[in-house]
Image (spheres, helix red, strand yellow):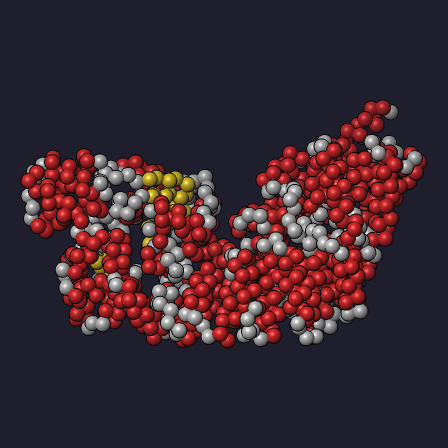
Amino acid sequence: MKPSRPLYEREPELAAAAQAVDALCGAQAVGGLLIFSGEAGIGKTALLGEIQSIAADRCTIWSARGGETVTSVPFHVVRQLLQPALDRFPPDEMRALFGSWYEIAAPALGLAEPSGPQPDPQGVRDGLDFVVARLASRLSHRPLLLIIDDAHWADGESLAWLASFTARLGELPVLVVQAHRPEELAARQKESGPGSAHPSQVRVALRALTPDATAELVRAALGEHADDPFCREVWAVTGGNPYEAVELVAKVQDRELAPLEESAGLLRELGASARGSGLVARLERLGTNATRFAWAAAVLGTDISQDLAATLAGMSPAEAADCTARLREARIVTGFDPLEFVHPLIASAVYRSIPPATRTAMHGRAAWAITRAGLGPAAASRHLLEVHPDDDQELVEQLREAAKQHLAVGAPEAARRCLERALQEPPRQRVKATLLYELGCATLLSSPATTVQHLRAALAMPGLDDDQRIDATYRLAAAHSHNNQLKEAASALAVEAARTAPGPGLMRLQAAHFLWEGMQAGEEDGPGRSGRLARNADHLHGRDNAERALLTLRAFDAMLRGENSQLVVDICERALVDGHPARGLGWTDAEWGFELPTLVGITYAFTDQLDRAEELFGEAVRAFEISGWSGAHLAFAHTLLGLVHRRRGRLAEAEGFLREGLRLADRVGSGLPVHWDAACLLIDTLVARGRVTEAREIADRYAFGAPYPSAMVLPDGPCVRGRLLLAEGRTKEAIAELEAAGQALEPRGRFNGVWAPWAGDLARALAEDDPARAEQLATSARVHAERFGTDTAIGEALRCVSLFAAPEDAIHLLAESVRHLEASPSAYEHALALVDYGIAIRSPRELARAHKLATACGADSLANRAHQARASIRASE
């Protein structure tokens, strides 16, 4: 990448690079991202070469380059960057270097065969981050400089990794220098989503050379006698593009033209030969063999093997060597073995000049040669994608196998391209349904809407066996749910269940149907569904996973309805095996999904079984991390741990987990179900801490409010928003929100006041203006809490009822509330009751206890209230 000629008018760019390298190599070792952009030929590669020279004695440098013909090869750029460094490690040291990320990240780099479950793409990116960080620490004597040229042609997987990796460069002693063509990169990012910026990012747009700099370039090559009119014409012909100016000067030297005004009229014709059709004509003048060899090299694209190019061109090694020499002399290729084109503009022009039929045939030969060499369908797939459809069933199977290999290394988009191309062949009718099913599975995480389309099509045609139909329907429902279409999910399951014979498959469909019906924020006949679920599940003992799934759903539904908590816990126990999810129902098992163990843990969390819930959710974090599922799954696991800490009253710890859940979710996208759950719980936690302004900031940032998603939010979203509005003093709005929450929940029979505390909060809001209704609400909430039977529910309900009792009765009710909450795991609610009780009996001792407990919870506002009340009582004594 080192430049072979001086750079002109690049002082600002070099100064920015020198400053970044100095920061990297300084005492603080500050990393960052330096981006150069500009049109083709503007001098990006030469600039990167100069930067490499500047840093060569101070940094460890890894470099990579995108290629126009290899954008479909997953992790192509990442492999260029990392493999040379990793090749130095023996296998045992390699495993140690990767640590627990080996099975996840090593296959993406081509260093190991895939094993275990299909990795989450975000997990692969995190694994690559880890490896780069470890390598950077191993190279601690020299900071790390990564140089990526032609980033607009980087493969999608590498672009996604670069976007996530560069967002955290402030944490690492790594400098990334990237060059790209802005319009082409913008087009790529429109497909994959833009990367996020970070504070250490510097962007520099390269400009064309001025007439003076162009004249300096001309005279450096042709001599000081080159006159002004000639130099001016060179600038006019090339537009100040450095590559075109250098090529034009070289043509002048080849033709032995005098660099004087009388020769200026010939420059336009010479300039045309440096690009487009002129370059192709120049190539053709080298002869048929040289042209075919150049075509073969262009088809191969990067890392061009002379022998493989000779095979594609159909010539002997001696002929290939002769062609290579002629192409080097004509400044079309450089290097020996492997070869590369002198400039990407040349590679593009040569590739596009190949007659379409010939280009297709050469891609086919390339795929055959790669497969014959034992490199596998995934390596050959970029060429298979370019072959014209021709009813070739062997090609269909090769592309299906390539898709499996791409999925196994965490490249679902590459798999999607292979399967979509296989559909065009087309496949035989008996294979098409299975192929559509595979395509739907490949796009589930990246495009739920596309998954719905493919799986519907697969289910509408013959070809799937019974197990495939059941699995396709299950995944179709999941895709609908990810797309905020829970009614459609339930409908698809009901239709398939109606045509499925009794057995485990039918029970799987029925369980999923109950799941997505019950998860809807609103449904027409909630009590009816709950009744059907109870009749289907109450007699079961958990003998197989289908029974355990139904028991899980029954327990969760019973918890929401506020049925007897001991009954609920007993049902949970039947849904587990020795207190843990059964094999096949675990956090990363694909058949049933992670929703079922999630529901068990949530049910425990709202029945005061917080140790059990924390154990399950801790298992979830470990399972997702081991499997590399560090996207939405890991975000949800952190959110669930945040829920446990919120219920325990460990508010600071809850806030930490919930913010981490949001951070992890933000890396994946926006508007995900986990965003709603994490934001809801974080708002509730911040309100409990007394940090209402921060809670409002979270609500605004994540658009927390109507319209709510079609899926229920954890805990009930309108209830939490109503609580926020009350804390802000917006009582009328809060009353409207809480009234609406009650009107949605009561007809469905959902009376768990810990999950959805609308009645208690509404009673407090109405206490002054409508005390009769407020007391009625509080009394009803107490009835439901005593039916549910947990200490948290009863204690909270008694504290609310005390607001409407005579003073003596209120003291008794608050004492009972304190007793129940002291026996519960809910420390924050216990602190609330202690404050109310201490104020009611005017006890500095009880208020001191309340202050200590509130402080331990992280409830600063409540602690201040206890302190002020205690001080006021003492002052009045």
Against 4, residue 623 (above or below) is below
Residue 274 appears left or right of 435: left
Task: Name the quadrant containing residue 219.
Answer: top left
Is residue 4 visible to us here?
Answer: yes
Where the C terminus falls, by quadrant? top right
Q: Residue visible at 68% across and 42% down?
A: 685
Residue 693 appears left or right of 144: right
What is the x, y in percent for residue 567? 82, 60
Is residue 338 visible to us here?
Answer: no
Against 226, residue 631 (above or below) is below
Task: Name the quadrant containing residue 381.
Answer: bottom left
What is the x, y in percent for residue 561? 79, 54
What is the x, y in percent for residue 73? 39, 61
180 or 77: nearer the viewer: 180
Q: Residue visible at 77% across and 29% down?
A: 868
863 or 233: nearer the viewer: 233
What is the x, y in percent for residue 404? 47, 68
Q: Residue visible at 43% across and 70% down?
A: 426
Against 181, residue 862 (above or below) is above
Q: Residue visible at 40% across and 75% down?
A: 394
Task: Name the quadrant containing residue 241.
Answer: top left
Residue 648 appears left or right of 437: right
Residue 214 appears left or right of 461: left
754 or 296: nearer the viewer: 296
Looking at this view, name the residue that lies furthest to the top.
876
Count of numbered marks: 0
